[in-house]
Amino acid sequence: MSQERPRDEATTAALQLAAHVRSLDEAGPLWWLSFCDPSRPKGQQLLGVSIVQATDSAAAVAKAHRLGCNPGGEVALWSLPIGAAFIPAEMIGRLVPPAEVPAFDAAIWHLVDGH
């Protein structure tokens, strides 16, 4: 009869992290959503961007609406080539205003490139 060996704290923490990463991956990819209003003057059309995690593009738009990070207008979106475990939680599920988009964009792509 085999007995289960006691786990040390590091092993337990590693197993918990692996389970958390698996659960994030099962929730779907991250989606970058860019919102604009083409009826506004050039240079003022961007309404903001957000990142959400969803199973597909339609679910991403719906989730952004539910979370309050969809300001309306037209949306362009694409899945990010990085898992949710590698993006800080405070960067997901919020509307990034136009003035903050360049810095936000640079921060996200720095995380993607470093992955």
Image: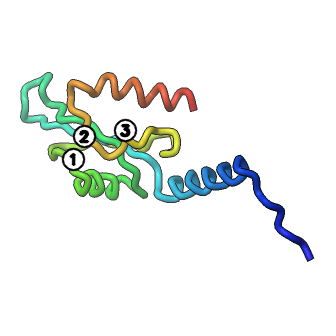
Q: Residue 7 has which mark?
A: none
Residue 58 shown left or right of residue 44 in the figure = right
Mark 3 or 1: in front is: 3
Residue plotted at (30% across, 41% down)? 50
The residue at which mark 2 appears reads as 95
- Determine contact: label 1, label 2, CB under 8 Å: yes
Direction right: furthest residue: 1
Q: Amino acid at mark 2?
A: Leu
- Residue 49 in the image: above or below residue 6: above
The residue at which mark 1 appears reads as 70
Q: Secondary structure at mark 2?
A: loop
Residue plotted at (30% across, 23% down)? 102
Q: Secondary structure at mark 3?
A: helix
Query: x and y percent of residue 11 in the render?
Result: 73, 51
Q: How far is mark 3 from mark 2, CA to CA? A: 9 Å
Query: x and y percent of residue 23 in the render?
Result: 53, 58
Q: Nearer the viewer, residue 78 or 66?
A: 66
Work out whether mark 3 precedes mark 1 in sequence or the reverse, and give the earlier one.
Answer: 1
Q: Amino acid at mark 1?
A: Asn
The residue at which mark 3 appears reads as 91
Work out whether mark 1 precedes mark 2 in sequence or the reverse, and give the earlier one.
Answer: 1
The quarter in which the N terminus is drawn is bottom right
